[in-house]
Image (spheres, grey):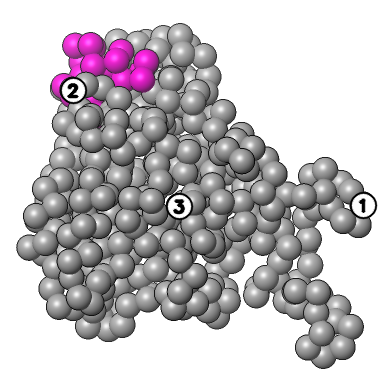
């Protein structure tokens, strides 16, 4: 079955008890046993729940993995991967990185004795130079947040594959989604998602997931962490994410179409100094994006010539684009990056990433294209 068919059917067979077409929500904390140790596959919802199992099955299928593990947030999913490391071990992370991930690695990870090097991996040889005997994990965002940098996953996997022992390669695939990018087929060990974003797709649920390439010792450790730490989503949250996946392909096509139009409009506006969108031929990694992805996504980042004053004016004057931190919902959102998404980072760290006082990030929704452009045009006039 192809992507859209799997999104509607994998893990979502009619309920055997009632033949309900839509999978049921199992809002139970525990399951009544026939006898001690005799179950129908479930005994306590922190360990496993049928609604969560349905979500994990369809996620694994859509991302091309052997299995998926769902978590209560994207950050919880990220930490499960980082928790594979022991004190004294090392992470190499890409430069264009979500502020929350930067905080998780450099502050929470450091508290647990894990060191992190932030490296610009646009040239894969820089990764090779950054690897040490203690490196156990390479963490990559592509497209990156917020600059939408595209990294060559296959090339980075090749660098890692020459090391012994081989570090894990984890790709945060939140911006691309399983519909537009398959990191596991390109050599990654794990694909991580904030399912809050495009997978949920309606700004009404918080969640995260790790999809693994193989059911190996690392998967067993992640599965143990999921159960032992207990940062798992509720059955209702899982149901919302399954519902979101049903329309992921349809939504992503609309997100991409609108984002391309918005990026082109902004690129020609005199108040805008630069626009980053992988679908623009001006994007430095446009050709790589065309090879590695099947679509360019719904995120656009731009920089205003008027700096902070102009950026703050823009994000507070739009009428359709809502000023909000998240992304990936059907409605368009706009964020002032230094204050809203990357405030965790010191100013010099933001500058190294390319973020300036005028940087604005847009999550382009599925409204009418003409309305979105008219909204930005009226706001930019100010």
Question: Is residue 265 on the magenta stretch?
Answer: yes
Q: Is residue 73 visible?
A: no
Q: Quadrant of residue 17?
A: bottom right
Q: Can residue 232 be seen in this view?
A: yes
Magenta range: 260-276
Whole-number angstrom distance, CA of label 1 to CA of label 3? 33 Å
Secondary structure at badge 1 equals: loop
Q: Residue at left 23%, top 16%?
A: 267
Mark sitting on residue 193: 3
Whole-number angstrom distance, CA of label 3 to CA of label 2? 28 Å
Q: Residue 254 at x, y = what percent? A: 50, 23
Q: In which quarter of the image is residue 372?
A: top left
* Residue placed most toward the observer, 28 or 312: 28
Q: Residue 28 at x, y = what percent? A: 79, 67
Secondary structure at badge 2 equals: loop
Q: In which quarter of the image is residue 243?
A: top right
Q: In the visual, does 241 lie left or right of 308?
A: right
Q: Residue 357 at x, y = what percent? A: 18, 36
Mark sitting on residue 18: 1
Q: In this view, does 150 lie above or below 94?
A: above
Point out the tag, 1 or 3, that comes first from the N-terminus.
Answer: 1
Q: Residue at left 67%, top 49%?
A: 10
Point out the tag, 3 or 2, that comes first from the N-terminus.
Answer: 3
Direction right: furthest residue: 18
Q: In this view, does 80 lie above or below 126?
A: below
């Amino acid at each position: 079955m192809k992507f859209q068919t799997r999104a509607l059917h994998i893990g979502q067979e009619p309920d055997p008890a009632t033949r309900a077409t839509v999978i049921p929500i199992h809002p139970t904390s525990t399951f009544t046993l026939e006898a001690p140790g005799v179950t129908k596959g479930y005994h306590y919802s922190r360990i496993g729940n049928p609604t969560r199992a349905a979500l994990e099955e369809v996620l694994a299928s859509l991302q091309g993995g052997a299995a998926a593990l769902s978590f209560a947030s994207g950050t919880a999913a990220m930490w499960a991967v980082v928790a594979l490391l022991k004190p004294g071990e090392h992470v190499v992370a890409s430069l264009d990185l979500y502020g929350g991930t930067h905080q998780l690695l450099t502050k929470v990870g450091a508290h647990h004795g894990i060191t992190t090097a932030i490296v610009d991996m646009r040239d894969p040889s820089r990764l090779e130079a950054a690897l040490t005997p203690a490196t156990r994990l390479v963490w990559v965002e592509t497209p990156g947040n917020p600059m939408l940098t595209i990294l060559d996953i296959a090339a980075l996997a090749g660098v890692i594959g020459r090391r012994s022992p081989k570090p894990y390669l984890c790709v945060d695939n939140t911006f691309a989604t399983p519909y537009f990018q398959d990191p596991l087929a390109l050599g990654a060990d794990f694909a991580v998602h904030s399912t809050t974003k495009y997978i949920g797709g309606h700004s009404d649920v918080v969640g995260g997931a790790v999809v693994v390439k193989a059911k190996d010792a690392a998967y067993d450790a992640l599965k143990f962490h999921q159960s032992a730490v207990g940062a798992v989503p509720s059955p209702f949250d899982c149901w919302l994410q399954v519902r979101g996946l049903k329309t992921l392909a349809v939504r992503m096509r609309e997100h991409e179409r609108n984002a391309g139009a918005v990026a082109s409009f902004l690129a020609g506006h005199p108040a805008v100094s630069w626009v980053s969108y992988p679908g623009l031929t001006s994007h430095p990694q446009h050709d790589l994006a065309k090879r590695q992805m099947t679509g360019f996504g719904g995120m656009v980042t731009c920089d205003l010539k008027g700096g902070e004053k102009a950026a703050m004016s823009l994000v507070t004057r739009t009428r359709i684009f809502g000023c909000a931190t998240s992304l990936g919902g059907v409605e368009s959102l706009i964020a002032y990056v230094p204050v809203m998404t990357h405030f965790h980072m010191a100013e010099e760290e933001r500058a190294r990433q390319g973020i300036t006082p005028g940087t604005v990030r847009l999550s382009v929704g599925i409204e009418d294209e003409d309305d979105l452009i008219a909204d930005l045009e009226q706001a930019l006039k100010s």
